[in-house]
Amino acid sequence: MAKRRSYAGRAIEISFDMERCIHARNCFLKLPQVFDPARKPWVDPDAAPAEEIAAMIRTCPSGALAFRRLDGGRDETPPVLNRVAVLENGPLAFAGDLRVDGEAMTRATICRCGASGSKPFCDYAHVAAGFAATGEPPAKDGDAGTDDRGGVLEITPLENGPLQVKGAVEVTSGTGHRLNVTKTVYFCRCGNSANKPYCDGSHKRVGFTAAGPKAG
């Protein structure tokens, strides 16, 4: 697992984890003076106000970018509601008070094509693999949950199987349409379910192999 690389400025420290990047390009498109892949180093934390940089980093869907305020400003906190968005032909984008395989984070994109080399995280392999899956699946009839969509959300990759999600969460389409509110759900991560984004047991049929939870 690659370590985060940090870039400290006067008011904010920016960190980056390449293995979690899905190349959404929010950083370069919104603040090119701060984030420029053609420059070395590619991050200049003093090229914009710290509040602007922090606001942009909060839009990084994968959590590859993170920040720490050095000027007494507010660090990132989890959103009030836990959410997972089903992205068209791409990963599951989580935001909330997340514990991904035990690690605390607020944003994460999780592979659902089965091809990522950085499982459980997406590494953009779905593009080369030609993964095709709608980001607008039908809504479930009747929510299994309540209006409570906060609290810790446990996200656990099961060995050779699906992604287990436990905790209050709202499932949405890629465009934000509500599909379901639940407290336990299993998402396909082999890419072969006929009921995407949910698991239907196809991982057994296709012989999907992937590591399970970390020991301990």
Image (spheres, rainbow, N blue to C red):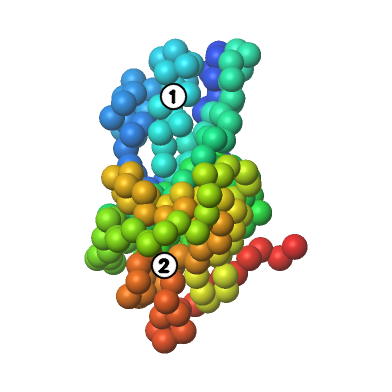
Residue that numbered label 2 is attached to: 198
Badge 2 element? loop
Percent of width and height locating residue 124: 35, 55
Q: Residue at x 53, y 76 (%)?
A: 160
Residue that numbered label 1 is attached to: 55
| Marks 2 and 1 close (CB-CB < 8 Å) | no
> 70 or 147, which lies in front?
147
Q: Tell whether 48 sits left or right of 80.
A: left
Badge 1 element? helix
Percent of width and height locating residue 189: 44, 67
Other residues around mark 2 within 10 Å, as few (<14) / some (14–19) / many (≥20): some
Q: Is residue 115 above or below residue 32?
A: below
Q: Tell whether 150 sits left or right of 39.
A: right
> 152 or 211, which lies in front?
152
Q: Residue at x 45, y 80 (%)?
A: 201
Which of labels 2 and 1 is toward the front? Answer: 2
Percent of width and height locating residue 175: 29, 45
The residue positioned farthest toward the bottom in the image shown: 205
Q: Tell whether 209 sits left or right of 77.
A: left
Q: Residue at x 40, y 27 (%)?
A: 56
Task: Tell me the amino acid under the disc marked 2.
Answer: Tyr
Q: Quadrant of residue 6?
A: top right
Other residues around mark 1 within 10 Å, as few (<14) / some (14–19) / many (≥20): few
Q: Is residue 170 above or below residue 34?
A: below
The quarter of the rendered structure image containing the N terminus is bottom right
Task: Tell me the amino acid under the disc marked 1.
Answer: Ala
Q: Earlier in the sequence, mark 2 or mark 1?
A: 1
The residue positioned farthest toward the front in the image shown: 142
Q: Residue at x 40, y 84 (%)?
A: 206
Residue 100 in view of the camera? no
